[in-house]
Image: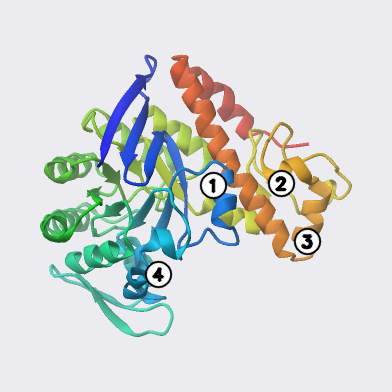
Amino acid sequence: MFKYEVVKVCKQTGARIGRFYTPHGVIETPVFMPVGTKATVKSLSPEEVAEAGSQIMLSNTYHLYLRPGHELVRAAGGLHKFMNWNKPILTDSGGFQVFSLSTLRKVTDDGVQFNSFIDGSKHFFTPEKSIEIQQALGADVIMAFDECTAAGTDHAHSKDALVRTADWLRRCYDFHKENGEKQILFPIIQGNMYADLRKESLERTLPYAKCGVAIGGLSVGEEKPVMYEMLDVMKELYPEDMPRYLMGVGSADCIIEGVIRGIDMFDCVLPTRIARNGTAMTFAGDLCIRNAGYKDDFRPVEEGCDCYCCRNYSRAYVRHLINTDEIFGGRLLSIHNIRFLHRLTEKIKEAIWQDRLLDYRNEIIGGLGEKLG
């Protein structure tokens, strides 16, 4: 039920356009995936997310395990029915949240004991438990349980995490093979910011990659050139016949640079998080709609944008909503920002078809840094 086919390769860069076939639909890559952490993209309906152009949504194993519980979601018929989304869904393993949200945790080769960020209660995640939860949630794409190290972790500890991640991957794979159906497991490459460890992790990962591979542990505080360097190290080593997913990346410049380096899938909470704070993503850079200069600006948030917000409302109105803490303002900018990233990937695909992705990158990157009038 899962297959990936490359339909175009950019002669300038090797970037690809592809089709990823899943039980709930075909995803055309490169693709940005909005994040519905708790089975919803915050403040938006599934219909609004789909209308913005979304092909697939991401949800979070850690949060759904804690609330409302994976068995409840299973009883509801899985995530697709629970949140009324009939397109593909990807769930992460919960590993990143276990390491980033839990101040009290104990890591062993067997798994991770951690305290809930909600009430402090103790829980224990093993690779098998993560897969069991994701199978109950019923996503199309599920992720292996991994140990993500923070930027700046030394080589020795990064190597330890890499080895543990590889062992956990084997256990995820074996458990999923025995119990899984209608789902594909993506292994995750780790290795921190060390070229040798990235290559080693990729080599250890490939035997378990059947129709997709993920790159974790980047965009975790390092400078962007360092992330690009790690992607360059891995670019020639990826399998050709499966999608490559860069986890947690959602800014326009990083998406373009990622596609140039062979990445096909991206996700991030950035577009909706900054929307709720009053920031719009545009092709001329970020626009802080709270600023007084937009008080009587009756242009759309972005000229030429076809999203629901820009078709119907002005900067002045959205600014009013944001500055008076009206929920509708954050909703409108969330719709706009998601649509912006889909418009960006559409333009990237057009540049790939025309074999001019580097030219497009050079044109757009400068504009993204300009101050809007």
Between the C-alphas of marks 3 and 1, the distance is 28 Å
Mark sitting earlier along the chain (3/4): 4
Residue 50: mark in rendering: 1
Residue at image location 50% in from the left, 61% down from the top: 40
Pointer 1: residues within 10 angstroms few (<14), some, or many (20+)? some
Which label number is shown at residue 309? 2
- Of residues 365 and 342, the one nearer the viewer is 342
Which mark is first along the chain, 2 or 1? 1
Q: Quadrant of residue 180?
A: bottom left
Report whether 195 appears left or right of 329: left
Q: Nearer the viewer, residue 276 or 163?
A: 276
Distance between the Cα atoms at labels 4 and 2?
Answer: 30 Å
CA gap, disc 3 and disc 4 = 30 Å
What residue would you read off at disc 3? Answer: 323
Check disc 4 and report the residue beneath it: 63
Q: Earlier in the sequence, mark 4 or mark 2?
A: 4
- The amino acid at mark 1 is Ala
Q: Quadrant of the N terminus?
A: top left
Residue density around tag 4, few if under 14, some if 14–19, many if 20 or more, within 10 Å: many
In the structure shown, which secondary structural element does the residue marked by tag 4 occupy? helix
Q: Earlier in the sequence, mark 4 or mark 1?
A: 1
The amino acid pointed to by label 4 is His
User: Residue sitting at 47 percent across and 25 percent down?
Assistant: 349
**What's the residue at 22%, 42% (across, down)?**
198
Q: CA distance from mark 4 to mark 1?
A: 23 Å
Q: Secondary structure at mark 1?
A: helix
Mark 3 falls on what kind of element?
helix
Q: Amino acid at mark 3?
A: Asn
Q: Disc 1 and disc 2: Cα gap in Å?
A: 15 Å
